[in-house]
Image (tube, rainbow, N blue to C red):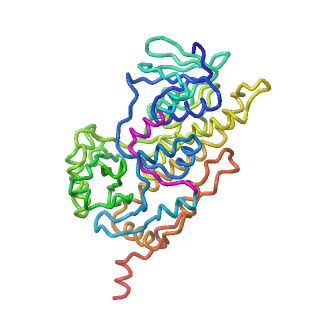
């Protein structure tokens, strides 16, 4: 294709999802990936019903389920004493929203989308590092480090946390949370896994740290994630997030959590950054998508999901906004995309920050949080209805947010015991 309809920059989950979505609308799509080969790093990823609904629409859900695990339960426990705080019945959740909660290896999800793009005829180009973007009379242009240019009617910049295209809209920088994540997978035959329910997504929340585990690849392995606040990061040092900080951060947690730390990959860790929300994602015929627009912290497991939603929404608006001859009315489609997605993603980014603060409380606030979580009914979906329902295509279809419950309204167990005494 010498002149495709669309150029997508970035071959991650968001870029592949957008390329597939737009190809479904009959568009010729070229995807530019900076790496010499397609691939994804990391381990597990959680896909809530707002994402599996889209995978089903794409005809990809059956394959995704065959590669992952559909868990029965999500449970939150206190990382210090190991006691259960609250849970979701994920089978009931599937009945409520119509689609399952799925956990899958990130590389398996990426591979699934890559194969879908190949079947759909997306032109995939590697070793294509985009260094600049500009609008043209006929659309937009992406220029590579090699000097080569690619032009199309529109350019979708799915170029990640350190997006070049974002600079066209705002002069900002990634925001460090001072938290760092360690990941690791454990083969099912090891004793560590034999003691775990692989049908459970579990998170242990503790002072300045949390620990997550769930099964992957049909129960062949256990995925573990350990996240903690780095004292060195808070002190402004460059050498932060190292394995000695990992061990120190979890020293006060329960035996089960500490026993999982030796299985972490200790040669690599992920420092956790997001960016402040922005409400403008479109610059002429150049549009942001995924982490270039809304990189979140990971606490409500919506980062990749938001990127997949972005691509689906954009494709749906291309279908709804066409000129008399059937070609996309890009100005209308991009305006409709920008009218709905930034506000939803702003909510996710800000809620993710607040949820992270809630998870990592200590002292009396921790006790108050625990009391509120223990009081929650298992079938109470008021805190996730805004998130797990159908992805909104227009602002009027965006559901209302939940009402936060003040910590001060809780009576911690310790306070209750003192009153009884």
Residue 413, percent from left and from top: 37, 77
Give whichever of 252, 195 is nearer the camera: 195
Residue 271, percent from left and from top: 34, 41
Question: Would residue 225 be visible to someone looking at this image?
Answer: no
Question: Would residue 275 be visible to someone looking at this image?
Answer: yes
Give whichever of 155, 327 is nearer the camera: 327
Image height check: is 113 above or below 406?
Answer: above
Residue reaching furthest to the top: 147
Residue 348, percent from left and from top: 52, 49
Residue 419 picture quarter: bottom left
Give whichever of 275, 221 is nearer the camera: 221
Magenta stretch? 98-114
**Left or right of residue 338: residue 119:** left
Image height check: is 362 above or below 5?
Answer: below
Name the quadrant of the N terminus.
Answer: top right
Q: Residue at x 55, y 54 (%)?
A: 99
Q: Residue at x 54, y 25 (%)?
A: 122
Say if the magenta span includes residue 120. no
Give whichever of 317, 204 is nearer the camera: 317
Image height check: is 81 above or below 159?
Answer: below
């Amino acid at each position: 294709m010498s002149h495709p309809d669309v150029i997508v920059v970035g071959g991650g989950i968001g870029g592949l999802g957008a390329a597939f979505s737009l190809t479904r609308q009959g568009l010729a799509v070229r995807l530019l990936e900076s790496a010499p080969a397609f691939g994804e790093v990391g381990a597990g990823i959680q896909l809530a019903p707002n994402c599996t609904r889209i995978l089903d629409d794409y005809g990809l859900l059956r394959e995704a389920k065959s590669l992952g695990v559909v868990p029965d339960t999500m449970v939150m426990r206190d990382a210090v004493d190991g006691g259960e705080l609250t849970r979701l019945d994920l089978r009931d959740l599937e009945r409520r929203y119509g689609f399952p909660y799925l956990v899958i290896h990130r590389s398996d999800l990426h591979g699934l989308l890559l194969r879908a793009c190949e079947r759909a005829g997306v032109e995939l180009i590697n070793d294509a590092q985009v260094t600049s973007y500009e609008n043209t009379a006929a659309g937009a242009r992406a220029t590579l480090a090699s000097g080569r240019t690619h032009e199309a009617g529109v350019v979708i910049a799915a170029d990640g946390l350190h997006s070049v295209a974002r600079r066209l809209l705002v002069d900002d920088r990634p925001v460090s949370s001072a938290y760092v994540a360690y990941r690791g997978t454990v083969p099912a035959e090891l004793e560590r896994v034999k003691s775990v329910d692989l049908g459970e997504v579990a998170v242990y929340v503790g002072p300045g740290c949390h620990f997550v585990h769930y099964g992957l690849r049909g129960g062949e392995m256990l995925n573990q994630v350990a996240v903690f606040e780095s004292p060195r990061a808070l002190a402004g040092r460059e050498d932060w997030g190292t394995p000695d900080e990992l061990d120190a951060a979890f020293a006060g947690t329960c035996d089960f959590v500490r026993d999982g730390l030796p299985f972490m990959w200790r040669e690599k860790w992920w420092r956790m950054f997001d960016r402040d929300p922005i409400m403008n994602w479109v610059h002429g015929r150049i549009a942001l998508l995924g982490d270039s627009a809304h990189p979140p912290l990971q606490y409500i497991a919506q980062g990749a999901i938001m990127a997949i939603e972005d691509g689906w929404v954009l494709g749906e608006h291309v279908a709804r906004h066409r000129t008399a001859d059937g070609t996309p009315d890009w100005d209308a489609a991009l305006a409709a995309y920008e009218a709905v997605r930034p506000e939803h993603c702003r909510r996710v980014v800000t809620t993710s920050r607040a949820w992270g603060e809630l998870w990592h409380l200590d002292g009396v606030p921790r006790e108050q949080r625990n009391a509120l979580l223990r009081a929650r009914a298992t079938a109470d979906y008021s805190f996730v209805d805004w998130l797990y329902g159908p992805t909104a295509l227009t602002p009027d279809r965006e559901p209302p947010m939940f009402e936060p419950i003040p910590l001060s309204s809780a009576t911690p167990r310790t306070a209750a015991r003192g009153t009884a005494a």
